[in-house]
Amino acid sequence: MSYRIEKDSLGEVKVPSDAYYGAQTQRAVENFPISGKRFPRRFIRALGVVKKACCLANEELGRLDVARAEWIAQAAQEVIDGQHDAHFPIDIFQTGSGTSTNMNANEVIANRAIELMGGELGTNDPVHPNDHVNMGQSSNDVIPATIHMAGATAIHEDLIPALRHLHAQLHDKAEAWDHIVKSGRTHLMDATPVRLGQEFSGYAAQVAHGIRRAEAARDALLELALGGTAVGTGINRPKDFPRMAIARIADEIGLPFVEAANHFEAQGARDGVVEAHGQLKTIAASLTKIANDIRWLGSGPRTGFYEIALPSTQPGSSIMPGKVNPVMSEMLTMACAQVMGNDVAVNIGGLSGNFELNVYLPLMTINLLESTQLLANGARTFADRCVKGIVANEENCRATVERNLAICTSLAPAIGYDKAAAISKHAFKTGQNVREVAKEWGVLPDEEIDRLLDFHAMTVPEDA
């Protein structure tokens, strides 16, 4: 590999000759060989959007000449389009402000602009990464703004549509199965009857609430720190600069981003990210409940509930022929467990800022974006490869209701709690069902017993 020699404030650095990045990025690569994890595409795209918007705002304000602005904007657009992702090599676990990655972007855009203008990489002439690309900015406002942009975009474009897709699948099942009566269960024990459609309507409602929570998570990220520069005071930037840059960002991304109401809050704290991820954690808890219920309902097929048949997606055992496992539920619950773990890291990051800057920004970024991706991909895959293909086992559902001892509940208003409990206990002891014992004991006329033991009627409130 051939190298070029660059200089920064610390001295000379060897940089690969074909790299668009420069000395500061190279130092970070050498300093942080930690995880092998880099900032994901969505973050790099958002960072490119910031740099392009700032460039054009500086041009409009007369601070950046037209020639430099044109090439900087083009280079930033190439970053937005993903043409230079290989030139963003820095590990996530780096300086807590993300300064290394901000300078990475400045160097890549500056060098690409230099190349477009016919200059030589690494010379900082005619475009300087700090003086021109980073004009009016600091890592301390750029990186927090980029986190919000990337997170809000991921939630809006990926998670919310995935949850809507899952909701539609669950809603369809709820409607199709509204006529199927089955045993309810509380404490994992037999309870009064419900309709299979009612159960699935509950799951659909959980996801509907999840959509609302995802929208709230997105909205918690719409304030941008851009304009606070070093410590929130806005040093070295014109008064109108953030407003002009953020208007371009909102137009580029299609979300109503605004300048932070208070730049000291926006840089010293990361409460918006903590709030947003808290909503993601709640969605993860909700999806876990749904996935677990569905695998319980499909358990068996001979020795479990088997009230629904889950689609067979792959062989389930290397030793037991014919076994099929609820792998889609297992996938989703593991993804959700990871989101809950990520929430711990986000909370620690959120509480760990000092004075005018939070210094856990890269950690919070990777966890916010990973959690969004896990939930979005998990929900969509679960909808397509599990929920869509579930088939109701009506025969099993009916059989469990007839055997259910809790149906004695509907007799209690007519014969009293104690007599109904005695019927239930006797039925369990003798292996009979509640209907048989009630008629054998003659507690009510047979037709009245049959009326009270109408299973479908047990699933709706009584008329006044």
Image: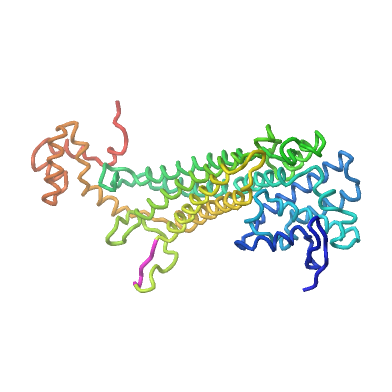
Residue that appears at 69% across and 35% down: 263
Q: Is residue 224 magenta?
A: no
Outermost front residue? 10
Outermost left residue? 441
User: Where's the N terminus, which quadrant?
Assistant: bottom right
Residue that appears at 53% across and 39% down: 212
Rendering colour mode? rainbow
Residue that appears at 50% across and 42% down: 210
Q: Position of residue 315 (x, y in %)?
A: 41, 69
Q: Position of residue 335 (x, y in %)?
A: 49, 55
Q: Nearer the viewer, residue 201 or 41?
A: 41
Tell me which secondary structure the magenta stretch mostly adopts.
loop
Q: Is residue 88 left or right of residue 335?
A: right
Quarter of the view holding residue 225? top right
Q: Is residue 359 left or right of residue 292?
A: right
User: Where's the C terminus, which quadrant?
Assistant: top left
Outermost top residue? 464
Q: Nearer the viewer, residue 464 or 317?
A: 317
Residue that appears at 13% across and 44% down: 425
Q: Position of residue 413 (x, y in %)?
A: 19, 31
Mark count: 0
Quarter of the view holding residue 353? top right
Which region shows up in magenta?
Answer: 320-325
In the picture shown, does residue 304 fall above or below 198? below
Quarter of the view holding residue 93? bottom right
Q: Position of residue 43 (x, y in %)?
A: 67, 52
